[in-house]
Image (cartoon, rainbow, N blue to C red):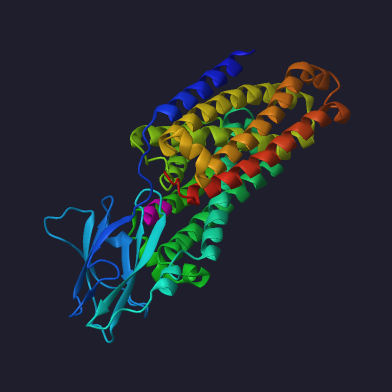
Amino acid sequence: MTTVHRSLLVLLSALLLGLLGTTPAAAHTELVSSTPKDGARSAKAPDRLTLVFDEPVDLADVRVMTPDGDRLPVSRVPGRGSATVRVALPRATGDTLSVTWSVIDEEDGHATSGRLTFGIGARATQDRGDEATAAPAPSPSVRRGLVAARWAGYLSLALFVGGLAFVALLWPRGAGEPRARVLLGLAWTCGLLSAVAGLGLQGAYADLGGLRDALRPATYADVLTTGPGLALAARGLLWVLAAVVLAALLQGGARTARSPGWRVGAVAVGLGLLRSTGMAGHNSEGSEPSWGAVADLVHLLGVSLWIGGLAMLTVAVLPRREAGELAAVVPGYSKLAAVSVTAIVAAGLVLAWQIVGSFNALLHTSYGHLLLLKTGVLAVVLVAAWCSRQWTRTRLDLAVLLRGDAATVRPFGYSVAAETGLVLVVLAVTSLLVTADPGR
């Protein structure tokens, strides 16, 4: 058993013990109580409504709407803390008054919503069974669009940050290779577009609107007043800044890739992109949010170095089949990938402990099931990575001796391609995890 395998076994054991002994943490923001209560009846129509949530909320994240779609003013209640808000109600025109509410979790941008109905006068309120089932919820189309935007964002981030690192650390000559340049350019373009689209979709999701609402300027204006919206906007601005780093590399080629000044700028932009991406996730939930933020940054960095390097190998290095490049690049990437995978697993265990909170939640919640699915696919990816590493150890010298003979390199290419394809599945499951409720 290798040292890496022993380390992974120890980390997995630590996760199991941690999940068995950890107290579950709180999930997304929920409504605890309301005054008047849902279903209450009074002789006079109430002129205000008090909502109490299970954690502090920002006023911009709380939306209370009439059935006609009018947004009602929300304010603080003096002396009641930041988990309580007051809503000014409109004048009732019938024997019932109904409002819908929604609140956005400040940490991960998830929406929780519901409906409250009050009776007015002596007449009993009508059966509200149909109204309860019709309580507002985020549009399935918007949710799917948000998952797609996040998947594209994760993939673009990994290809861009990992691709830049691959060129700077292992293959400076790749800055002049057309395939590598196209890959980095596409990654940057998709990253910027996914950030812009994600901002509109997050706004539509928060407003419980449809896909058309994601294109409205007012939606963008509203979402920029929320914490998740500001994180998405920061990510978009960092993608704009990343254009400067990319343009310098494309213009200067290998010389720029070796430049210490450019590398410092690339590291700063890359870390900014990684951190802003993690700010809209579940990592800050749980008892130790600081550990969650650090683990998320390490996790994303490891994934980017791994996936970006895989893509560069598949798209740009292997098709050239140059013996000198194979001898110089492949062993270096093999070591970098081993370190990245170890960091991914270690940080992933910390995040699982931080987010899931208990072994029971891992087995009996949809979030836990998705996490287990991601772990299973990742295990298959690691098998493909092990095959690639074995080829590097046993067949690389022969491939160099035969000057990159196609038959000799082909098995390694198949292994890397399979590894890359499975990683895309892992990213898809990760996008679902970000939009799922941990359900603790």
- What residue appears at the point 71 percent right and 30 percent down from the top-left corner? 384
219 displayed left or right of 336: left
Query: Which image quarter holds the N terminus?
Result: top right
Query: Which image quarter holds the C terminus?
Result: top left
- Provide residue 399's location: percent of width, then percent of height: 82, 22
Can residue 360 be seen here? The reply is yes
Majority secondary structure in the magenta region: helix
147 displayed left or right of 416: left
In the image, is residue 291 part of the stretch drawn in magenta? no
- Provide residue 51's location: percent of width, then percent of height: 25, 62
Image height of 61 relative to 261, above or below: below
* Pick the front one: 217 or 27: 27
- Provide residue 302's location: percent of width, then percent of height: 54, 32
Can residue 177 be seen here? The reply is no
Which residue is most to the left? 79
32 displayed left or right of 215: left
361 displayed left or right of 26: right
- What residue appears at the point 47 percent right and 32 percent down from the top-left corner? 298
Image height of 353 relative to 81, above or below: above
Image height of 278 relative to 393, above or below: below
- What residue appears at the point 68 percent right and 39 percent down from the top-left corner? 422
* Pick the front one: 308 or 140: 140
Which residue is most to the bottom? 93
Res 417 quadrant in image: top right
Q: Which residues are magenta?
A: 228-232
